[in-house]
Amino acid sequence: MTIRPRWGGAAVALALSLGLAACGSDDDSGGSKAPAANDARGPITVATGKDLTQTVQKLVAKWNGAHPKEKARLVELPEDGDQARQQLVQNMQIKSDAYDVVRLDAVWTAEFAARRWIVPLPQNLADTRSFVQAALQTGLYRGKLYAEPWLTGTGVLYYREDLLAKAGIKEPPKTWAEMRDACAKVKRLPEGRRTDCYAGQYSKYEGLTVNYSEAVQSAGGQVFDPAGKPQVNSPQAKAGLQFLVDAFKQGTIPAKGITLKEEESRRAFQEGTLVFHRNWAYVYALASAGDGSSKVNGKFGVAPIPGKDGPGSGTLGGNNLAVSSFSKHQASARDFVAYIVSPPVQNEYGRAQSFPLSLAALYDDPEMIKKYPYLPALKKGMDTAKPRPVVVRYNEVSAAVQEQVTAAVTGKKPVDQAAEDLQKTLAALAD
């Protein structure tokens, strides 16, 4: 699992109203309670994602040097967010103490907290005022802090600045129509003949849920309203789904797009085969690599995602750090979490890689903006991004979305039928 906000993560990350939170019910996973919280210290294992930049390893090495009796060991979970979640769930269900600190997609917090798989954290474990407040909210469940926010952000649009300039286009598109027109102009260039227009993440996994909900929001709709009622059969929501269907049908999204996840689509953009690409901010550093691994280094820009009639609305992604209820060394685990999310460590981490972090000050830091010019676009996108719900049954909601959206974009169902079927399923889940 690549370290990224997904949602992301993973990754993840469905932009639904927080009003759905009231629909969840507690589940203590079979009726047996988790062990009582403890203050024991000792070595810990941290379950996280693939450390592409090796920066986390360096931070862990510093921790280990200062805590020789409480050394941390990293364990990499699968790159696929759904597989990573399954591995964590299986671990928790057997009450294994194999993991002490677990990195959760922000949307998993409610499920893990409700099932008592993670322990509440002290409110003073970290300075909550230093966080992006929307990210902090993703660590709460029923008013208690269960996970500290670490990574955050929203989907952004990567675009081939060089090709747009050669086509006479001065600014990135703000609407879907502008994006299609820009692609048509680029395709007329000798350099653009072999490029595809646009791609996000459309494989049948969590990324599809995120991309669908962004399309719905970017058309003025919402998947759930503030009262927790599904609204996927509204005209606006249908317009969002219709955009995805038409994009596949017309070739705006290439046929292979149905197989793409974060990493596959990122590699396609880096190889120079896409004009526009929706992904998370972690892509920036990799696409900017000067070691020959990226064919678009110095040739691309970043902007907020486009929408139906103006700038679109992304999903608020993020990854949080929590302490397992089954850890034998919870005091060490809590201190490690506090260490990783502390301002000095986030500053160091932020300057070494492009994953957007939960420390609010980083988004206005001139040095950071110079190093990562995407930050203003990301901050602007986060202003209109929508959070995913704090809901125990989120996984079922996401699976239902994936099923019906896949049916629509592959032509197995018309948009109206897919929307109505999804509305019925989500209504049943919300009851």
Image (tube, rainbow, N blue to C red):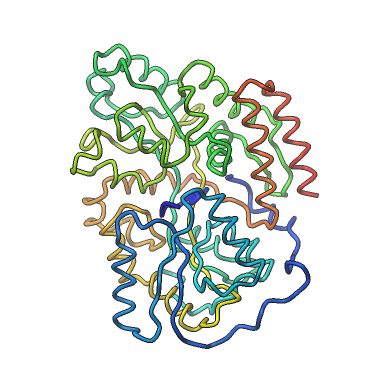
Asked if residue 316 can be seen in this view, the reply is no
Residue 238: % across, % down: 65, 27
| Residue drawn 57% across the image and 70% down it | 146
| Residue drawn 33% across the image and 15% down it | 187
Residue 297: % across, % down: 22, 37
For this rendering, which residue is in front, 182 or 200? 200
| Residue drawn 65% across the image and 61% down it | 111
Residue 167: % across, % down: 26, 17
Asked if residue 256 can be seen in this view, the reply is yes
The correct choice, above or below, for 126 with respect to 221 in the image is below
For this rendering, which residue is in front, 232 or 170? 232
Where residue 266 sits, quadrant-wise, is top left
The correct choice, above or below, for 419 with respect to 11 in the image is above
For this rendering, which residue is in front, 403 or 391? 403
| Residue drawn 28% across the image and 68% down it | 58
The correct choice, above or below, for 261 with respect to 135 in the image is above
Where residue 284 sits, quadrant-wise, is top left
